Amino acid sequence: MRIFSGIQPTGRKHLGNYIGAIRQYVEGQDRGDPAIFCIVDLHAITVSYEPAVLRERVYDTTAILLAAGLDPERCILFRQGDVHEHTELCWLLSSVTAIGELNRMHQFRDKSLAQRELVSSGLLFYPVLQAADVLAYKAQEVPVGEDQREHLELMRDVARRFNSRFAPEDGEILVVPEHRIPEVGARIMDLQEPTRKMSTTGGTPEGTVYVLDEPKAIEKKFKRAVTDSGNEIVKDPEKPGVSNLIDILAAARGTTPAAVEEEMRTARGYGDLKVAAADAVRDMLSPVRERYEELRGDEEALETALETGAEKARAIAAQTLAEVRDAMGVGPRR
Ligand code: ATP
Ligand code: MG
């Protein structure tokens, strides 16, 4: 079983990233042979950014992943830009990707609207590079949040199209991957605007809980979370704020939303729900923050971990690239 996922080194990682993705990575490293996790610096340059900050954020993100429990001995953790096979495969896959498909992607639409200076062509191409990330390792399983559903569908189409165009009749070259989304918490919403996903680039500062927030900040953000009228603690599409708090509490405790509703039946109001959610999230994130502080200080060790990971990743990706090039008639006859 091959597991692959990528995470952006943009901004600070938040509760949605932690529940929707990072926690699944940690669980996946004992099932993958080995599981592969990539810090996607090349995706991060598709929106406006500062080079020096990007480099810092790569180390921040690496330290968060290690603090959350990823073990470079048990999984492959690396930086995308270190493995050139990703960009080469991206280009090769563009020959089986329609421009109309890319134009329709919601992430492209949302992020291009948010750009003030320039909408880069990289932003349009983002899903092709993402397809290359996954397909280069012939991954079967991709643990990501709900927001990536559309990109996953696209990469599945690209893989199928590639195989039917270039693979021999009796076999496939690329593997069509499956989306793995968590049962609870696949889409954590902004605490201030609970109809929008919690996000690195598009959220509200007060409504975004960061993995590295101090307990006081976490408590404050939950206390001020937007709820809804009424006082019933049940999941309901009409009550996005309360539904989100129920999901967060369930995910943080490792239980179900139904169990949370049951427990909260005796609560005095939304205040109790907010306090319970804040406590559970604080208890979940505090150990990660503490380990992060230790790990982030040793940049050299982080760099060594990333370089070692890149070597292992390259060995796998290079093999896929050789097959793809060969099938496409690129380069000398083998
Ligand atoms: P951006 O808003 O700039 O795209 P992001 O917050 O989505 O940033 P990413 O690094 O793109 O962060 O996402 C990393 C992982 O976290 C992906 O698997 C994504 O699906 C997941 N994820 C992102 N936001 C949420 C959320 N609100 N709830 C659950 N999972 C999420
Ligand atoms: Mg994202």
Image (tube, helix red, strand yellow):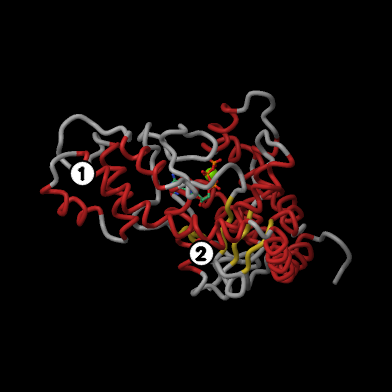
Q: Quadrant of the C terminus?
A: bottom right
The answer to whether 121 is drawn above or below residue 282 in the figure is above
Any mark on residue 118, and which? none
Which quadrant of the structure image shows residue 243?
A: top left
Q: Hey, which residue is sitting farthest top in the picture?
A: 116
Q: Choose between 140 and 206: the one closer to the eye.
A: 206
- Rendered location of residue 1, percent (x, y): 53, 73
Q: CA distance from mark 1 to mark 2?
A: 38 Å
| Residue type (three-letter) at the residue carrying disc 2 | Glu
The answer to whether 145 is drawn above or below residue 314 in the figure is above
Please tell me which residue is depicted at 61% across the width and 70% down the height of the picture. 72
Please tell me which residue is depicted at 32% across the width and 33% down the height of the picture. 224
Q: Residues within 10 Å of mark 1 (few under 14, many from 20)?
A: some
Any mark on residue 141, and which? 2
Tell me the element at label 2: strand
Return the disc, 1 or 2, that comes first in the chain's sequence.
2
Q: Hey, which residue is sitting farthest right in the picture?
A: 332
Would you say the residues marked 1 and 2 are in contact, meaning their CB atoms lie under 8 Å apart? no
Residue 252 vs residue 208: left or right?
left
Q: Residues within 10 Å of mark 2 (few under 14, many from 20)?
A: many
Residue 230 vs residue 322: left or right?
left
Asked whether residue 244 is in view, the answer is: yes
Asked whether residue 149 is in view, the answer is: no
Which quadrant of the structure image shows residue 181?
A: bottom left
- Rendered location of residue 229, percent (x, y): 19, 29
Q: Choose between 11 and 147: the one closer to the eye.
A: 11
The answer to whether 123 is drawn above or below residue 91 in the figure is above
Q: Hey, which residue is sitting farthest left in the picture?
A: 266
Residue placed under numbered mark 1 in the picture: 272
- Rendered location of residue 129, percent (x, y): 66, 50
| Residue type (three-letter) at the residue carrying disc 1 | Asp
